Image (spheres, rainbow, N blue to C red):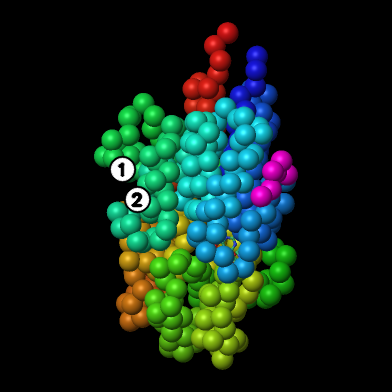
Amino acid sequence: MNKIKVMSVFGTRPEAIKMAPLVKMLEKDERFESIVCVTAQHREMLDSVLEIFDIVPQYDLNIMAHGQTIVDISNKVLKGVDEVIKKCKPSIVLVHGDTSTTLNGALAAFYNQVPVGHVEAGLRSYDIYSPFPEEANRKLTGVITNLHFAPTETNKKNLLDEGIKEENIFKTGNTVIDALLNVVHENYVFEDDKLNNIDFDNKKVILLTTHRRENWGKPMENIFEAMVTLVKENNDVEIIFPMHKNPTIRELAHRCFDKYIDRVHLIEQLEYIEFTNLMAKVYLIMTDSGGIQEEAPALGKPVMVLRTETERPEAVEAGTVKLVGVDKDEIINLANELINNNEDYDNMAQASNPYGDGKACERIIEILYNTLREDD
Ligand code: UD1
Ligand code: UDP
């Protein structure tokens, strides 16, 4: 029997984290030949995930350059993936989510008339400029996708509403949970001693992450100013901010936080295992990240989402996540409630997991097999 050639294309950290368990499972499955093509839209942040999951890509387009635009990324991904597809002739190309790698990887497959499988399909905010450019990326990818792997019922419904045929949509759960369940441990000791020295039991430690393009400038300034106010108003609050590698964010963070370094810990991006275990130990998470909104509910950690919309309404409905926006006073008010009101806090700190049972990869693989196998 000929093996089914599955080529996975990804390039940024979140795509790598969510594709890693699928790639590992494909590698072990004799029915498939797994080919990994990384664009390296992210370099260090991608490499750290590849190392943790022990993935050695057959193709590495190495496209990252500082200061590059979305158009620069798109050009390089489209051309690079096209060349790899022509060489490998895969049976299907898998892409994940909504980055520039996702859309252009899918487009390269489409131009070669190779079927596209879209992992994490059907998320929608219904605002084309927020998140930017991700909302458009995932919609456009959907148009040229053959197999849509939708994490939740809501995601499936979004695709149906856009006229995608039901027989091409598969509700699988999110692979983020498959990855997460293997790495968080109760007695985890951090590799970074700075984190071991933080008093998680007696301080209210807030984990902050922010990187979205639509938050650059004034919204991000509001977020940082709100954090400074929270530290000033609450003696027991400390903030940990692993700074995204993007220079735009780092410059602003230093400008706003450098005076408060005893209680605002500006640190480098953490490796995935360190980060997820840190999530499990902190009091509260504030973020504009997509993936973190999915991981935190499974860990029972309240999340304040620093955005005006979300394509992940399931965790909001479950009560673990609140959409707070980017207004300074609103951030301060809600955070103060959660810091000082136990009942409000406890209501949010309920472990719930609307994103799956950790078996999404298994399901995706069986769908790939059933759809692509050549009948004897
Ligand atoms: C990208 C995705 C976004 C995703 C995010 C996850 C696009 C347009 N954006 O945003 O959807 O949510 O990744 O984090 O696809 N850098 C490094 N080292 C790294 C990674 C980034 O130095 O390992 C710096 C580089 O200067 C790079 C810049 O960050 O040019 C921006 O990277 P880019 O991929 O363009 O955008 P992100 O903001 O990371
Ligand atoms: N993450 C990480 N180290 C960090 C911050 C985040 O490993 O310092 C992980 C996090 O657990 C999640 C993913 O990165 O799985 C989210 O990535 P990001 O916020 O960059 O992108 P998004 O999900 O918003 O696209």
Residue at 58 percent of width and 46 percent of height: 79
Image marks 2 and 1: residues in contact by CB distance under 8 Å: yes
Residue at 58 percent of width and 87 percent of height: 258
Q: In this view, does 84 lie above or below 65?
A: above
Q: In this view, does 296 lie above or below 27?
A: below
Q: In this view, does 217 lie above or below 35?
A: below
Q: In this view, does 139 lie above or below 12?
A: above
Q: Is mark 1 on a helix, strand or loop?
A: helix
Count numbered badges in the picture.
Answer: 2
Query: Which one is in front, 291 or 337?
Result: 291
Residue at 56 percent of width and 15 percent of height: 374
Three-letter amino acid code at disc 2?
Arg
On the image, the x and y values in percent for residue 26 come to 63, 32
On the image, the x and y values in percent for residue 15 come to 55, 50
The C terminus: image quadrant: top right
Three-letter amino acid code at disc 1?
Asn
Decide whether the magenta segment is chiefly helix, strand or loop: loop
Crowd band around label 1 with a 10 angstrom C-alpha radius: few (<14), some (14–19), many (20+): some
Question: On the rendered structure, is 282 left or right of 54?
Answer: left
For marks 2 and 1 on the same chain, the one whose residue lies earlier in the sequence: 2
Q: Residue 158 carries which label?
A: 1
- Residue range of the region highlighted in magenta in the rendering: 56-61
Q: Can residue 197 be seen in this view?
A: yes
Q: Can residue 17 be seen in this view?
A: no
On the image, the x and y values in percent for residue 235 come to 49, 87
The residue that label 2 is drawn on is 124
Q: In which quarter of the image is ligand 1?
A: bottom right
Quadrant of the rendered structure where residue 246 is?
Answer: bottom right
